[in-house]
Amino acid sequence: MAHKRERSLVELYRDDPERADAIAFGRRTGPSRRGFLGGAGLAGLGALIGTQIPFAANMPSGLVPMALAQAPANAPKTLTFPGKAPGLLLLQERPLVAETPEHMLDDDVTPTEKFFIRNNGLVPDAIPSDVNTWRLTIDGEVNTPLQLTLGEMKQRFPVVRYKLQMECGGNGRNQFVPEARGNQWGNGAIGNAEWTGVRLRDVLQAAGVKPSAVYTGNFGADPHLSGATDRQSISRGVPIAKAMDEHTLLVFEMNGQPLPVIHGGPLRVLAPGWPGSASHKWINRIWIRDREHDGAGMTGTSYRIPRVPMVPGSEAVNSNMMVMQSMPLRSIITSHANGTELAAGAREIALRGSAWAGEKTVRAVDVSIDFGQTWQSTTLGAPANKYSWQRWQATVRLPSHGYFEVWARGTDQDGIMQPHVAANWNPQGYGANAMHRVAVLVRS
Ligand SMILES: Nc1nc2c(c(=O)[nH]1)N[C@H]1C(S)=C(S)[C@@H](COP(=O)(O)O)O[C@H]1N2
Ligand SMILES: [Mo]
């Protein structure tokens, strides 16, 4: 009898999470179901999940179990798109935005079919059939403005290939309370592909960067959503020093194949370790500026974070906002999807995951199965090259059947760790990097 009721509550969560929350935790309204679990709720939690919680005593009060935190009723649809694997999450149709669920990021090098998509505007339709005729203009604070075709670039400059992570600035946004504006990414707006291209540095040096150069301003061929031809869907850039980094590329191949149009082909910028929006797709002009670029996505609360933490939910003060540079530290569990059920008797779990830290490297990844009471170190690989993510693995013992959460927490090269909850709230939700949690159920 009791079992029946538990099941129906789980079903209720699936169908009507707001109501399920009200029933289980006595809450009637509110935009977020996170963080409101009271003592009474905790008592009924085992029943709700349908099994014992061996480490329930360690559960922080207010923690909503991972198995329930992702309300399937609000879960996005999946993407159907040529060349893309089933299972990518469709966050938005126009512009097209799709996330890779963490468990689909279980490759050392992210296959193109699993790589996330983030468009701000429309996909350009006038892509030349001969991609080598694609033109890029370099102008502004340079001695010799250049117009180069992709074919000429391949001839003139060394072609290099690196494994580089590219991560949306808003990755992890769904961790923010109160909810921040924008696509509610989990941790899957990230990919670590192998990119082939020429160094942006070589092209800029050919143009001769003037001492007055401060910033790049990127322009691409994707039309604005409104169709207005005088508006950019996005136009961001990076300081000259980042443009001159040997890993900042003009990319024309992804995983050994011509760069797909959906990922910015024939030509895109790849500025690894920085918000993905600095990796301009369909690039056709780089304007070298004598000041910080002020194109679409450079000002206000766009890709800008508070210098001094602001009150969550309040209005941003412009003078307190600065352009986000390096992405933060993050580690994810990729071997098991949230909600994984293991057969009765399973007492060991072989975990794998990825970790990265923007401009930095990751020193350690630790895992916990007891809500953070104890931690176990993992075997963490070195990056294939700078800005490549790192893979980790660990075998963890489970003491019994029941409900567990696997938590993964990275530590960067300076000893800084991921927080328990997203910090430095900002209106458009950049930089959330709380530790990753995955619910695992072992059947009795
Ligand atoms: N021209 C152009 N470049 C762009 C974008 C865009 O909308 N237009 N989106 C940016 C953002 S916000 C991200 S996170 C990455 C996503 O790249 P992807 O779609 O290849 O994953 O591209 C960046 N470059
Ligand atoms: Mo992004």
Image (cartoon, rainbow, N blue to C red):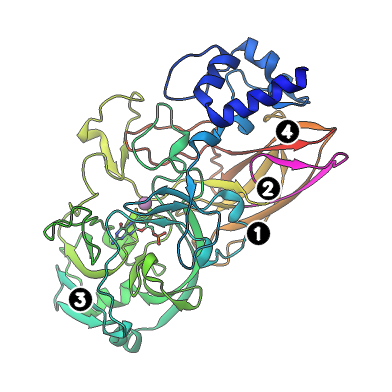
Task: Tell me the tag on residue 94.
Answer: none
Query: In this orientation, which residue lies closer to the viewer: 54 or 20?
Result: 20
What x and y, as percent, mark residue 300?
21, 40
Image depth: mark 1 or mark 2 in front:
2
Measured in 3D between alpha carbons, the distance from the residue under mark 4 to the one under mark 3, in whole angstroms, is 58 Å
Q: Is residue 409 visible?
A: yes
The reply to whether discs 1 and 4 touch (Cβ–Cβ < 8 Å) is no
Image depth: mark 1 or mark 4 in front:
4
The reply to whether discs 3 and 1 touch (Cβ–Cβ < 8 Å) is no
Q: Is residue 434 positioned above or below 156 on the image? A: above
Quick one: label 4 or label 3, which is nearer the N terminus? Answer: 3
Q: Which residue is mark 2?
A: 336
Q: Is residue 170 positioned above or below 249 on the image? A: above
Q: Is residue 34 left or right of residue 374?
A: left
Quick one: label 2 or label 4, which is nearer the N terminus? Answer: 2
Measured in 3D between alpha carbons, the distance from the residue under mark 1 to the one under mark 4, in whole angstroms, is 26 Å
The reply to whether discs 4 and 3 touch (Cβ–Cβ < 8 Å) is no
Q: Amino acid at mark 4?
A: Phe
Q: Which residue is mark 4?
A: 404
Q: Amino acid at mark 3?
A: Gly
Task: Tell me the tag on residue 381.
Answer: 1
Image depth: mark 3 or mark 1 in front:
1
Which segment is the magenta one? 337-353
Quick one: label 3 or label 1, which is nearer the N terminus? Answer: 3
Query: In this orientation, which residue lies closer to the viewer: 332 or 291?
Result: 332
Task: Tell me the tag on residue 208.
Answer: 3
Q: Amino acid at mark 2?
A: His
Residue beneath the point at 59% across and 57% down: 390
Q: Regarding mark 2 in the picture, which secondary structure is present there? A: loop
Measured in 3D between alpha carbons, the distance from the residue under mark 3 to the one under mark 2, in whole angstroms, is 50 Å
Q: Is residue 357 positioned above or below 418 on the image? A: below
